[in-house]
């Protein structure tokens, strides 16, 4: 939790080094290209942080990069000005530069020998302080401190939580027999491999607290569902029944998963405890039932089924019962993902011979197509609901693409060496 500046001297960032992952070469990190921005961007100046030049440059670069990629800010050139948060800014000068908001800060040694990053956010027009915080961290964790500062700025100016400190998971295919499950910061940096395999890895799904990943691995020559602890690197088998075991999705309380099993004939949706016990069948119908996803309140499961003759999206009580059809427009609608506020559903819809990202307002049932690509798949919401991350294909190569829920802000994430697939956006971190 972030607190006022004078109360934050003892705050330490969570060390990512505690995550038991393999180091991944730098060439495998995602690069992000901005392909669209918001219509009304906030003019924001981010002055260079005062202090040791190397650390201050690195910290300032992370903050600027995060906020610029969001598509919601117009960064005002600070012309290399270094501004300490303890010095009152020359508001008139920054207003003349076109800034409505200003960030100033510093980095220096803390009492325990680590680094302390401090900042303030100012309203240039009202000549007042909007926010301030301090983070005590180690030199290797300066990027994490930068993400935290960017989150504070974003939330204060936009009015909703920032997601720069969150992580994403995705699968990289480096060759016919080389698959890696990666974990990276939301900006694609600090990529590490949680699993390497000669067989496919699919359907990663974050636990609600961000400590575990469920996924499907074919390493035993069949699809098996695992739950993987990121802190210890240990994993357990959750579903390895006769036939196929696939499509894990966490319940909001993190105690159970919805999975798709064929152990009783046909693809049916079951729920299972996170330790693999307590298997219960949720659907009983002819045809294929797959891609389950819990609503934020845990009361309903959305899923894909061809029970009506074509793939469409349905919903059913998390306790079982009769299912209700949700999508009616078009002959192919799959991969339902419910927004964190429960008001919208992202899914993939076949339109004009292409598979495109769509979003439905669940109250009005109105649908908006958000992309113009042809091979979109695997939608996943950012934890604040602002952006949707998908896998798509450009030039015959798998890349990730992010688009805002209103379709205006677009980003493209790619890796130079390999196809990128199966994205999953992690939850907020504490």
Image (cartoon, helix red, strand yellow):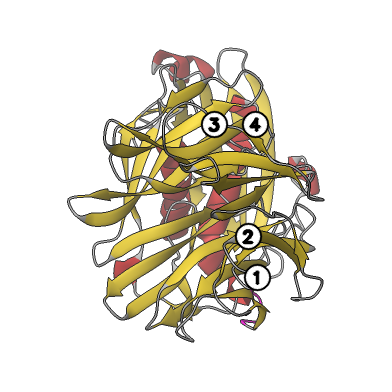
Q: What is the spatial separation of the Cα atoms under label 2 and label 1, in whole angstroms? A: 8 Å
Q: Helix, strand, or loop for circle 1?
A: loop
Disc 2: CA contacts within 10 A as few (<14), some (14-19) or many (>=20): many
Residue nearest the observer in this picture, 62 or 284: 284
Furthest-bottom residue in this view: 220
Disc 1: CA contacts within 10 A as few (<14), some (14-19) or many (>=20): few
Q: Nearer the viewer, mark 4 or mark 3?
A: 3
Residue nearest the observer in this picture, 65 or 114: 65
Q: What is the spatial separation of the Cα atoms under label 3 and label 1, in whole angstroms? A: 27 Å
Q: Nearer the viewer, mark 3 or mark 1?
A: 1
Question: Are discs 2 and 1 less than 8 Å apart at CB?
Answer: yes
State whether residue 47 is above or below residue 290: above
Task: Identify the residue position indicated by label 2 in the image.
Answer: 268
Q: In the picture provided, is 345 more to the left or to the right than 31?
A: right
Quarter assignment of residue 20:
bottom right
Task: Identify the residue position indicated by label 4 in the image.
Answer: 160
Q: Is residue 156 magenta?
A: no
The range drawn in magenta is 228-233
Disc 4: CA contacts within 10 A as few (<14), some (14-19) or many (>=20): some
Q: Helix, strand, or loop for circle 3?
A: loop
Sequence-earlier tag: 4 or 2: 4
Q: In the picture provided, is 385 more to the left or to the right than 1?
A: left
Q: Pinpoint residue 50: horizontal percent, then vertical percent.
A: 50, 47
Q: Main secondary structure of the magenta part?
A: loop
Task: Identify the residue position indicated by label 1 in the image.
Answer: 264
- For the point 40% across and 48% down, the residue is 377
Sequence-earlier tag: 4 or 1: 4
Task: Identify the residue position indicated by label 3 in the image.
Answer: 327
Sequence-earlier tag: 3 or 2: 2
Q: Helix, strand, or loop for circle 2?
A: strand
Q: Nearer the viewer, mark 4 or mark 2?
A: 2
């Amino acid at each position: 939790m972030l607190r006022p500046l004078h109360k934050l001297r003892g705050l330490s960032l969570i060390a990512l080094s505690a995550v038991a992952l393999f180091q991944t070469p730098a060439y495998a990190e995602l690069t992000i290209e901005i392909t669209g921005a918001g219509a009304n961007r906030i003019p924001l100046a981010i002055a260079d942080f005062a202090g040791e030049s190397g650390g201050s440059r690195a910290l300032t670069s992370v903050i600027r990069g995060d906020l610029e990629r969001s598509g919601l800010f117009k960064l005002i050139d600070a012309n290399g000005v270094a501004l300490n948060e303890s010095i009152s800014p020359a508001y008139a000068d920054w207003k003349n530069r076109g800034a409505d908001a200003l960030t100033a800060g510093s980095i220096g040694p803390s009492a325990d020998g680590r680094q302390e990053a401090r900042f303030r956010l100012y309203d240039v027009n009202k000549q007042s302080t909007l926010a301030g915080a301090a983070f005590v961290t180690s030199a290797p964790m300066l990027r994490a401190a930068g993400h935290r500062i960017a989150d504070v700025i974003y939330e204060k100016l936009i009015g909703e939580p920032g997601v720069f400190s969150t992580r994403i998971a995705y699968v990289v295919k480096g060759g016919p027999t080389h698959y890696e499950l990666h974990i990276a910061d939301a900006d694609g940096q600090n990529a590490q491999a949680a699993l390497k395999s000669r067989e496919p890895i699919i359907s990663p799904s974050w636990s609600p607290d961000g400590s575990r990943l469920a996924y499907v691995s074919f390493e035993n020559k069949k699809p098996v569902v695992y739950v993987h602890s990121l802190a210890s690197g240990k994993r357990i088998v959750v579903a390895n029944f006769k036939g196929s075991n696939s499509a894990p999705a966490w319940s909001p309380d993190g105690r159970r998963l919805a999975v798709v099993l064929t152990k009783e004939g046909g693809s049916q949706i079951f729920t299972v405890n996170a330790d693999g016990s307590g298997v219960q069948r949720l659907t009983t119908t002819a045809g294929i039932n797959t891609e389950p996803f819990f609503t934020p309140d845990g009361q309903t499961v959305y899923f894909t089924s061809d029970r009506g003759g074509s793939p469409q999206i349905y919903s059913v009580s998390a306790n079982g019962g009769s299912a209700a059809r949700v999508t009616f427009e078009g002959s192919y609608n799959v991969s339902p993902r419910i927004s964190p506020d429960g008001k919208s559903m992202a899914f993939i819809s076949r339109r004009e011979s292409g598979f495109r990202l769509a979003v439905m307002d669940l109250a009005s049932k109105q649908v908006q197509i958000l992309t113009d690509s042809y091979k979109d798949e695997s939608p996943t919401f950012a934890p604040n609901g602002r952006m949707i991350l998908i896998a798509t294909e450009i030039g015959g190569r798998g890349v990730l693409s992010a688009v805002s829920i209103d379709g205006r802000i677009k980003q493209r994430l790619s890796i130079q060496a390999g196809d990128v697939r199966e994205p999953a956006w992690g939850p907020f971190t504490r």
